[in-house]
Amino acid sequence: MDQAVLDFLQDKREIHLKELFEFLAIPSISALPDHKGDVQRAAQWTADSLTKIGMEHVEIYETKGHPVVYGDWLKAEGKPTVLIYGHYDVQPVDPLHLWETSPFEADIRDEKIYARGASDDKGQVFMHLKAIEAILQTTGTLPVNFKFCIEGEEEIGSPNLPTFVEENKVLLSADVIVISDTGMIDKGRPTICYGLRGLCGLQIDVKGAKGDLHSGLYGGAVQNPIHALVQLVNTFHDIDGKITVDGFYDQVQPLTEDEKQAYDALEMNDESFKQQAGVTELFGELGFSTLERLWVRPTLEVNGIYGGFQGEGIKTVIPSEATAKITCRLVPNQDPDEIVSLLKQHIEKNKPKGVEVNISLFDKGSPYVTPFDHPAIQAAGRAYEKVYGVPTSYTRGGGSIPIVAAFDQILQLPVVLMGFGLPDENFHAPNEHFHLENFDKGLDTLCHYWYELEKSI
């Protein structure tokens, strides 16, 4: 790569920060109807910026919710095409009084940019724009072809993006998808997340009598819905934490030896993890390390359980109903619909006597994984190492980003999660910030990546 590209970024740094501050000043909170106009302004800002850096066919596509912004540059004949995904919407800022400075007036303190969206995801989207601009301005061309798909609903679950992608598969066709909406495991430790767990969940409502009953008049003669619910929930796991739902593990894809070695290289410290979690000991499925339990093994968790009298003191009743909320984190090759079906069968099989049990479903998303030895993943690793000077860490994420799985399923392309945030940057919380070190090094890394990718796929 030409040194002039990196020099351009250094020379334009103050101008770029000023432009980023303009982007961050738009309160594009997708969850709040009062900010619909601001979300539209952010879409227009994104479109204008794509045009400014030299992208073509820039268009704002309306959806049933907030718009999707598209643009492309397709002049690298015979070279790979990259689809860059990101989002211009942000989380609400509440509680406002905990912010040290205004969330939409970016402020630099301690070599960090403080503002809502600085890390998630405006700052990282902006870096893609400026990296491509630097290459195009200094060389007159680009090493690969580019398409952009920047949406305004990620923070509310991307309800309309899967339909947009399905209806525009030709428009969005590419060789690889690159997303910078994740982070590094620690300061100075570049990280590529090559897999995410999927998600499915349901609510269990247990109904007994038509109303609460006096425990002195009825206790011992009728089923207590709380007792029944606890009995039912207790059937989901054995004493060592293994999930006992028939068929739950049947499709789980085992970890490869190369992946195990990559995880060992991360030198996960269980003692530090216990301190971080605030627990005295760890618990989980036997035969697996902490990282394996977090990243490559499925879970079934009770997220909430309630029923009966909740006030101070005691009220001697047998409650008429009780509820539990259950979610499962899923791994390749588990199908959310199949897991929900297995859960329903298990609940029916283990339903206690004397109560009615109803089930309602939550949102779901499929797991995703791109093999970490894929050429596009390894090219990203080399780009990180050139800039950060240390080996790249390869991880999976314990959480879920349903749109990533949707991209994988609809477009059937490898996904490279190439993020530059840090775990302590308060995304979704007051005082969100983004380290300038990763802003600078991230720009250089992206520039190196496009040239590495040109040679790799």
Image (cartoon, grey):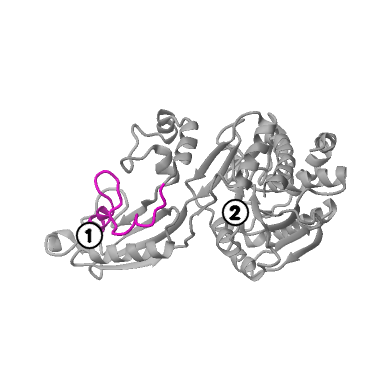
Is 68 positioned to the left or the right of 295 in the image? right
Residue 381 showing in the rendered view: yes
**In which image quadrant can residue 249 be found?**
bottom left
Q: Which residue is mark 2?
A: 414
Label 1 CA crowd tier, 10 Å (few <14, some 14–19, many 20+): many
Foreground mark, 1 or 2?
2
Q: Which residue is mark 1?
A: 228
Is 110 positioned to the left or the right of 54 in the image? left
Q: Is residue 257 above or below residue 64?
A: above
**Amino acid identity at mark 2:** Pro
Residue 22 showing in the rendered view: no
Magenta residues span 228-254
Residue beneath the point at 86% across and 44% down:
139
Is 65 positioned to the left or the right of 250 in the image? right
117 in the magenta segment = no
Is 179 positioned to the left or the right of 215 in the image? right
Main secondary structure found in the magenta portion? loop
**Residue 230: x and y, percent?**
25, 55
Label 2 CA crowd tier, 10 Å (few <14, some 14–19, many 20+): many
